[in-house]
Amino acid sequence: MPHWLQLMMDSLPTLLWAGVKFTIPLTLLSFLFGLILGLATAVARLFGPTPLRLIARFYVWVIRGTPLLVQLFVIFYGLPSVGILLDAFSAALIGFTLNVGAYTSEIIRAAISSVPKGQWEAAFSTGMSWRQAMQRTILPQASRVAVPPLSNTFISLVKDTSLAAAITVPELFQSAQRIVATTYEPLILYIEAALIYLALSSVLSNLQARLEVRFARYGGMMENSR
């Protein structure tokens, strides 16, 4: 067996375990919390009082205007100087959540804004409150618009988690770095890590395509029922 293939086979269990233990949980939790934060931010910008809108706009401006790596460094290496100590995983989770929240807020805000005003009027005419109209009428329609860009954000997040290696999170990429430090085979190990990321992204892209088809069918059923 070629040396490079043997090395990849020997290191594969370690890399996969790092992905299962750190990369995947970090991705799922960051996206979940970021989506909740993004929805709250979008609603604040669209319907909140002026002070809340300004705070939401400032948050989005700061996060979108600064590199994700810098944000992670500020949280993990910077906050201890003011007495806030976080372990590496928690710091990464906070950093990715804040980053995802800012970007998904713009996606959700645009999706909600794309729903015709007549849908609001129709919901209110049936006696719905603002919250009921949002939950039952607006968000279901906005989700059709938001799913493709949100899916792209999720797939990008899977790859972005490799930046957590810079703050010592032992995820997939840092595991590859550690093996490189002992084997001195950076090309083979980094290609293997890239292939694992590629496999994850490919699976998620396939799921995204199926999800879009399902939402398109749901949208067609809604149109036909009118």
Image: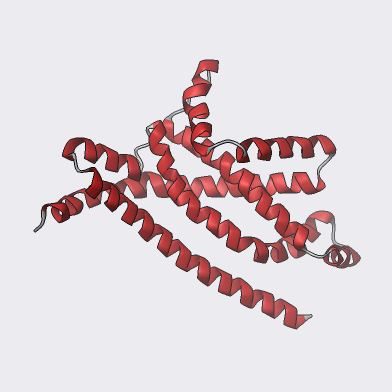
Q: Nearer the viewer, residue 105 or 88?
A: 105
Extreme-left residue of the structure: 1
Residue 207 in the figure: left or right of residue 212: left
The residue at 35%/50% (across/down) is: 20
Extreme-right residue of the structure: 125
Extreme-front residue of the structure: 187
* Quarter in which the C terminus is drawn: bottom right
Residue 74 in the figure: left or right of residue 122: left
Q: Nearer the viewer, residue 63 or 207?
A: 63
Relative to 147, is 23 above or below? Answer: above
Residue 2: quadrant of the picture: bottom left
Residue 44 in the figure: left or right of residue 159: right
The residue at 71%/62% (across/down) is: 142
Residue 59: quadrant of the picture: top right
Relative to 142, is 102 above or below? Answer: above
Q: Position of residue 165 (x, y in %)?
A: 38, 37
The residue at 70%/46% (across/down) is: 40
Residue 123: quadrant of the picture: bottom right
The residue at 62%/77% (across/down) is: 217
Extreme-bottom residue of the structure: 224
Residue 41 in the figure: left or right of residue 48: left
**Looking at the image, can residue 16 be seen?**
no
* Quarter in which the N terminus is drawn: bottom left
Q: Position of residue 192 (x, y in %)?
A: 27, 52
What count of labels does the image hold? 0
Q: Position of residue 72 (x, y in %)?
A: 49, 33
**Looking at the image, can residue 129 be seen?**
yes
Q: Position of residue 194 (x, y in %)?
A: 33, 52
